[in-house]
Amino acid sequence: MEYVVAAVILLVVLIVGAVGLVVPKMRRRDLPPPPTAGSTTTLERPPTAPEAPVEEELPPLIERPEPAAPVVVEEPPAPVVEEKPALERPEPSAGRLVRLRARLARSQSAFGRGLLSVLSRDHLEEEDWEEIEESLITADVGIEATQVIVERLRERVRILGTKTVAEVRAQLVEELVAALEPDMDRSLKTAPHDGRPAVVLVVGVNGAGKTTTCGKIGRVLIGDGGTVLFGAADTFRAAAADQIQTWGERVGAETVRGPEGGDPASVAFDAVKRGIDTNVDTVLIDTAGRLQNKVGLMDELGKVKRVVEKHGPVDETLLVLDATTGQNGLEQARVFTEVVDVTGVVLTKLDGTAKGGIVIAVQRKLGIPVKLVGLGEGPDDMAPFEPAAFVEALVGGDA
């Protein structure tokens, strides 16, 4: 019995102890009671996160510069040496017209061959002579010159009669050569004198090919062994000065030019002065093209000549005429002659016309010799005019 009581007491003690341990823990877990009116509640701050440890700043790393690229010393480019084109050597002018006779093929058909076919008939009636007159007038020989030529041919035929074609041809050649007045002085006065170069003034209307002709004349003179200086006195067209300078560069001739729109008389004066200083043989002055009915322009041309003559007289004044203009060229020549005293005619584009007789008309009407003829577009297609060779080329066939 005592053992039972003791066991019960021990069991009770164990239960009470266990309860005492558990109850306080449960009380600590209970939520606090809700706040009542008028009471204050102390807010609990959540525990702050521990501050991150401050890292000590390390000294900056010492940057090692990248190895510099090797310095490449560029050698200066070698200067570009422009190779000057080889200077052209124009062929001598002697015999040039004979070599260019084939260029007169168009005029041959309308002029010489047509006349020969008529003159070779057994009996020439009045209608035949009218046909001959018409052929000559169509070829721009001119009415007066045609009448003289036909009258002389009629007289020859009446006295000698019409025989072989060769004889008729010889008669025709003689009469045409006579109409060209072969005794006229056709030499170009281009030799230096009195310690200065010869001065040649080149004039003409617009579109006659004057600047090109001026360049070709220079080639004729250089081909014959002379030295030339160009004066670009056509200041109204920059292209004209460039063109004449190009002609000069091809043959090693200097060109004196002025500002575009400048005084052409001043350029001409400077060109002659430069020619004196450089001791050249001939100064060729290219003037601006102008219409013969423009009084102001013609007066300016007279001024160019007067200013140039301060150095000395002008040796040659060459009028450039376009052969394709026909009889209109005669009026042009007449007006230019009055202003600047033309001493010779340069007839261009004879290869492009069937009117080769204009040569006869110009000389007979104006008393001015044709000194040069242009027979093509090539740089050396200009030749000194030789009446006999020209007629032979016009008539065609064998001499």
Image (spheres, grey):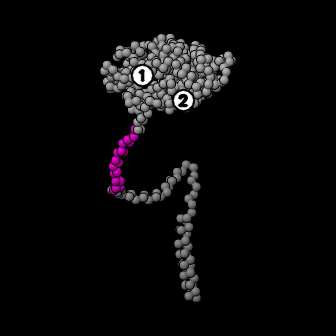
Q: Is residue 125 above or below residue 51?
A: above
Quadrant in the picture for the N terminus? bottom right
Q: Is residue 76 above or below residue 380?
A: below
Looking at the rendering, the stretch of residues picked out in magenta corresponds to 64-84
**Nearer-the-camera pick, 180 or 267:** 180
Amino acid on which the number 2 mark rests in the picture: Ala
**Residue at the (61%, 27%) spot, across then down:** 164
User: Mark 2 Cα within 10 Å, few/some/many (few <14, many 20+)?
Assistant: few
> Residue 130: percent from the left, percent from the top?
66, 17
> Residue 67: percent from the left, percent from the top?
34, 56
Q: SS at mark 2?
A: loop
Residue with the mark numbered 2:
399
Task: Say which label, 2 or 1, has the lower sequence index.
Answer: 1
**Residue at the (47%, 30%) spot, across then down:** 96
Residue with the mark numbered 1:
188
Amino acid on which the number 1 mark rests in the picture: Leu
Determine the CA span between mark 2 and mark 1. Answer: 28 Å
Q: Is residue 323 magenta?
A: no
